Image (cartoon, grey):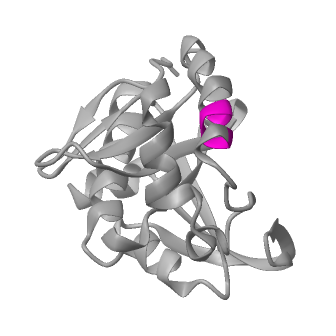
Amino acid sequence: MDHKGTVQLQTQRLILRRFAPEDAAAMYANWASDPEVTRYLTWPPHSSAELTGKLLALWIPQYDEPDHYNWAMELRETGELIGNISVVRVIEPIAEAEMGWCMGQRWWGKGYMPEAARAVFRFLFDEVGFNRITAAHDVENPKSGRVMQKVGMRFEGIRRQGGRNNRGIIDDAVYAILRSDERGNA
């Protein structure tokens, strides 16, 4: 693989870019403080924009690592920050990237997350050389699974009590897409 790190990507409606310290207030207001957004995530809602700023202060130096991929999702038209999409784990021996994403409620159901995921997947397959991209969701959160299906990921099965999030130990529905699947969908 040829790791390139978090490079800026653009879609029809989005700019996918690195986070910056000045993103803390928007990240906090638009999704990180919302208990509905974080319900199925592994981290609790942020209690303050200051806490969000401290998290970004930990994230931003990681951009120096070529195998770190964490994009802020910004609306091209307004510059508003609406969510993020990232590689949460890399498994080098099989060239696998495990994805995670979240977005503010105001933008749910508008196709932004599939649009962002398609761009990230193309980059990870074509530019970096990943062979397999996976994602999992709490079985009680089928909307996340619909995003995975929209981007061509295939359901691989349920890991019974295979995950943990803010609801506790949960069953995970696992999806994956291979580079050969992506090329077949192009």
Q: Residue 6: where, in percent of width, then height? A: 44, 26
Q: Is residue 148 magenta?
A: no
Q: Nearer the viewer, residue 131 or 51?
A: 51
Tell me if residue 159 can be seen.
no
Q: Does 89 sit above or below residue 46?
A: above
Residue beneath the point at 54% across and 48% down: 132
Q: Residue 19: where, in percent of width, then height? A: 45, 30
The answer to whether 44 appears left or right of 160 in the picture is: left
Q: Does 159 sit above or below residue 21?
A: below
Q: Main secondary structure of the magenta part?
A: helix
Tell me if residue 5 can be seen.
yes
Residue beneath the point at 60% across and 34% down: 53
Q: Residue 160: where, in percent of width, then height? A: 85, 81
Q: Does 158 sit above or below residue 47?
A: below
Q: Does 53 sit above or below residue 13?
A: above
Q: State which quadrant residue 137 falls in.
A: bottom right
Start and end of the magenta stretch?
Answer: 51-55
